[in-house]
Image (tube, rainbow, N blue to C red):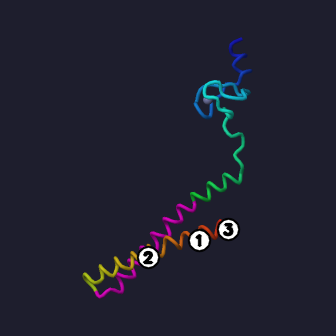
Amino acid sequence: MGQAQRRRQELIDCHDCGNAVSFSAVACPHCGSTEPAGPAVQSRRELRRLRMEATNDRRLVVVTVLCTGLGTLYGALTGAGGAASLWSALFYGFIGAVIGVPAAFVINVSRSLFD
Ligand SMILES: [Zn+2]
């Protein structure tokens, strides 16, 4: 009897407060959430947008690091040597970062436009 009743009630954990709530409940009796089962179906569009934002963040970091690294390398190779090379590397590394951030931003924006 007890088991049969549990199966009929289909208790789930409330998406918002974590308390047991009937799957068929319209609202959670504990926290009043109107979606105790959680968002039934997260739209593909929404999922895609979330994935794209994560990709954009990663790309921003990668492009910035890449530009900074290339700038530093360029400065080190073209520098006069010794301390001059070090300053040159720092300078071009900085230039790389300054160029890299907006470059990544432009890539992200243009990608989201054409996607
Ligand atoms: Zn709840």
In the rendered view, tell whether residue 22 sits above or below residue 109. Answer: above
Task: Tell me the tag on residue 113.
Answer: 3
Q: How many marks?
A: 3
The Cα–Cα distance between marks 2 and 1, rounded to whole angstroms, is 16 Å
Q: Secondary structure at mark 2?
A: helix
In the rendered view, tell whether residue 13 sits above or below residue 107. Answer: above
- Residue to which mark 2 is pinned: 96
The Cα–Cα distance between marks 1 and 3, rounded to whole angstroms, is 10 Å
Query: Which residue is at a point 62% across and 59% down the rendered structure image?
Result: 52
First in sequence: mark 1 or mark 3? Answer: 1
- Ligand 1 falls in which quarter? top right
> Dot 1: few (<14), some (14–19), or many (≥20) neighbours within 10 Å?
some
Type of amino acid under label 1: Ile
Residue 26 x %, y %: 73, 29
- Is residue 62 found inside the magenta-colored segment of the image? yes
Q: Are marks 2 and 3 in contact (CB under 8 Å)?
A: no
In the rendered view, tell whether residue 45 sits above or below residue 95. Answer: above
Task: Tell me the tag on residue 107.
Answer: 1
Q: Secondary structure at mark 3?
A: helix
Quarter of the C terminus within the rendering: bottom right
Question: Which residues make up the magenta segment?
Answer: 55-80
Type of amino acid under label 3: Leu
Q: Secondary structure at mark 1?
A: helix
